[in-house]
Image (tube, grey):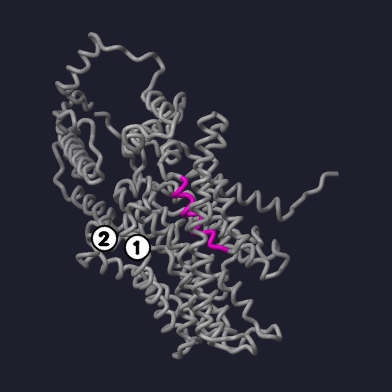
């Protein structure tokens, strides 16, 4: 007789597959219309399926009821996600980006990151009562501050990818945010181990251990800077360069197929994460350096610009990791913990960290004259506030949290018990870092939709009030209904046409300004075509007058220009250009030209009958707006 096999493995597969499938049905609506982060949504789903709710995801059961094993699983999962994310972040940057933009990156990763660390540590020191006013308490606060100092590359995707980024964030600003979030994740080690080594060697003396500040600084310089940071940079650059040369060699001889070519960056991330983990170096920084060196000549980035495999893997990892975080997060410790941190202190700390950790220092750096010259990507005060506010805390903070717990376990006394001066440090780090990470996921996940709602809601209400108070136009109802005394509906096609024309002209002019700001030039503007052509209404339909330039071009084409064959599209021609360019290592014309050709080929694959909403960025299809309507592109 058949029996049910309700095992943990089957339950996890069912829950994970079902959620990803359901989320995929409304993914464009959530991310591109309502600007909601998939990380925030997946976190809520993880809480709903956790042992505190539906009990479908049971992390402690998977770890055989061992908290240390659960910590190791979470740390390994975070390493995997960060490794893949940072290789992809390095790959998507243009050729030689780290070399060309070393000045702004030096400021962002140097003084600004240092001030983020100090400001966060001071806030933690002031609001955590168990640390005390002494120097050891400040060292403990430095540990927590170093965990939440790096900006998270996973949550940063909200402002560097998608329709919001395309319409509101300049391309150069997107790239500098990606480069900073990728590099500072690996550079969190010096801040963390500076405090940990000092706590270990000056907080408590071991017999014969040679404790002291001198040894702490020697280990910090040798083990952290030389072995962890410098070795990871050299290793990542070497592996990325060798991988690039091997892929070039295999592609020139037609040894590699398309599928293996596309997945090469993912496999490279897995290899670097595993090998760096074995030698004990900084696998996070090595992955980012390897990704950027791997596409140093821009060849791989342009060849994979029209493929969606890497974003698909990215999405699967993001959804899975934040579901896991929602299930393993110690929610009950926010209310009841053994270190005396009340919930109101955590709330105040979370708000102050999000406001003062990064925003003031980015804004000050922009206001300083030499700062504006060094970071030209930040063009105004609004962009400085935007970049300063969107420095999310997420996967990287959880990663450094468990690195800290692993180090603290090695500081137990000779009897195996925690040292008296740090016995509360592990629990305090868990409570504070998890709470700040959850605050950042929620706040940065809802900032854009709430901001959009606050921008559109007053305008919608004012339009509704104006339309309700407007005098009714001449009615076409019979005389018997006019004399009834009731309210009469208005019908004014002329005003509707005028409103349509005005809104259309305003939208075109706004799109033209956006294109100029992003450095893009419309084809119609190059041909001198006016954006305010006359529009005629015939029986309620809107018909545009064809410009003289388009009419003459069409007439000349009909007279003697060769016609394309049936079934041949612009995507075919652009893809053939790319295929001819990938025969060798050389890059034709300029990288910008190849990127433009690749983006055109991405608009619609040959033979594809489905038009997805995100094809709208290439001029295909329509996209629903925040208010529930649709934005339809009009062919010019």
Tell me: residue 129, above or below residue 432.
below
Q: Secondary structure at mark 1?
A: helix
State which quadrant residue 537 falls in.
top left
- Residue 440 image point, x, y percent: 43, 65
Image quadrant in which you'd find residue 613: top left
Residue that extends furthest to the top in the rendered view of this protein: 559
Residue with the mark numbered 1: 106
Q: Residues within 10 Å of mark 1 (few under 14, many from 20)?
A: some
Task: Decide if residue 223 is in sight here.
Answer: yes
Picture quarter with the N terminus: top right
Distance Cα–Cα, label 2 vs label 1: 9 Å
Work out whether mark 2 precedes mark 1 in sequence or the reverse, and give the earlier one: 1
In the rendered picture of this protein, how many numbered marks are placed on residues? 2
Q: Position of residue 335 (x, y in %)?
A: 53, 77
Mark 2 crowd level (few <14, some 14–19, many ≥20, 10 Å Cα) = some
Q: Is residue 64 magenta?
A: no
Q: Is residue 489 visible?
A: no
- Could you say which disc has been placed on residue 243 in the image? none
Q: Is residue 58 above or below residue 1?
A: below
Give the x, y percent position of residue 229. 49, 64
Task: Please state, as top left, top right, bottom left or bottom right, where the C terminus lies in the image.
Answer: top left
Q: Position of residue 456 (x, y in %)?
A: 28, 53
| Labelled pair 2, 1 in contact (Cβ < 8 Å) | yes
């Amino acid at each position: 007789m058949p029996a049910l096999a309700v095992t943990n493995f089957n339950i996890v597969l069912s829950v994970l597959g079902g959620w990803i499938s359901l989320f995929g049905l409304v993914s464009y609506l959530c991310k591109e219309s309502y600007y909601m982060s998939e990380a925030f949504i997946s976190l809520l789903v993880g809480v709903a399926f956790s042992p505190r709710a539906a009990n479908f995801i049971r992390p402690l059961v998977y770890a055989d009821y061992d908290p240390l094993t659960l910590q190791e699983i979470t740390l390994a999962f975070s390493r995997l996600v960060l490794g893949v994310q940072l290789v992809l972040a390095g790959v998507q940057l243009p050729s030689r980006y780290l070399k060309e933009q070393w000045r702004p990156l030096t400021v962002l990763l140097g003084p600004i990151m240092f001030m983020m660390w100090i400001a966060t540590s001071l806030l933690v020191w002031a609001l955590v009562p168990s640390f005390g006013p002494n120097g050891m308490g400040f060292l403990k606060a430095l540990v927590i501050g170093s965990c939440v100092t790096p900006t998270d590359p996973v949550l940063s995707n909200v402002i560097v990818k998608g329709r919001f980024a395309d319409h509101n964030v300049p391309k150069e600003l997107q790239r500098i945010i990606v480069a900073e979030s990728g590099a500072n994740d690996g550079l969190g080690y010096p801040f963390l181990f500076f405090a940990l080594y000092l706590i270990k060697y000056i907080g408590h003396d071991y017999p014969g251990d040679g404790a002291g500040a001198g040894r702490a600084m020697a280990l910090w310089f040798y083990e952290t800077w030389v072995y962890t940071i410098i070795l990871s940079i050299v290793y990542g650059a070497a592996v990325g360069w060798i991988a690039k040369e091997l892929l070039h060699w295999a592609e020139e001889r037609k040894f590699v197929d398309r599928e293996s070519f596309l997945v090469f960056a993912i496999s490279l991330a897995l290899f670097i994460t595993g090998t760096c983990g074995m030698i004990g170096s900084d696998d996070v920084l090595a992955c980012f350096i390897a990704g950027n060196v791997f596409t140093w000549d821009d060849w791989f980035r342009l060849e994979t610009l029209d493929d969606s495999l890497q974003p698909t893997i990215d999405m699967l990892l993001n959804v899975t990791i934040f579901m896991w975080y929602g299930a393993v997060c110690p929610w009950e410790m926010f209310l009841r913990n053994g270190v005396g941190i009340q919930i109101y202190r955590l709330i105040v700390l979370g708000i102050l960290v999000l406001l003062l950790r990064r925003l003031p220092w980015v804004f000050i750096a922009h206001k300083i004259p030499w700062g504006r010259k060094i970071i030209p990507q930040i063009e105004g005060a609004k962009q400085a506030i935007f970049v300063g506010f969107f420095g999310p805390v997420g996967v990287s903070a959880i990663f450094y949290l468990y690195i800290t717990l692993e180090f603290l376990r090695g500081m137990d006394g000779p009897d195996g018990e925690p040292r008296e001066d740090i016995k509360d440090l592990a629990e305090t780090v868990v409570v504070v870092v998890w709470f700040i990470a959850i605050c950042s996921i929620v706040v940065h996940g809802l900032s854009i939709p709430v901001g959009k709602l606050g921008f559109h809601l007053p305008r919608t209400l004012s339009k509704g009030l104006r339309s309700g108070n407007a005098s009714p136009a001449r009615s076409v109802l019979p005389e018997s209904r006019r004399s009834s005394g009731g309210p009469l509906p208005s019908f004014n096609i002329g005003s509707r046409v005028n409103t349509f024309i005005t809104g259309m002209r305003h939208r075109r002019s706004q799109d033209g300004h956006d294109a100029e700001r992003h450095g893009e030039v419309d084809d119609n503007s190059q041909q001198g075509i006016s954006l305010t052509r006359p529009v005629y209404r015939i029986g309620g339909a809107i018909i545009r007058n064809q410009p003289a330039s388009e009419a003459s071009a069409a007439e000349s084409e009909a007279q003697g220009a060769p016609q394309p064959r049936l079934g041949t599209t612009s995507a075919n021609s652009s893809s053939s250009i790319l295929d001819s360019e990938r025969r060798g290592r050389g890059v034709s014309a300029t990288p910008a030209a190849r990127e433009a050709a690749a983006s055109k080929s991405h608009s619609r694959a040959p033979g594809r009958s489905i038009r997805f909403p995100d094809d709208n960025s290439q001029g295909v299809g329509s996209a629903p707006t925040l208010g529930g309507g649709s934005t339809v592109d009009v062919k010019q």
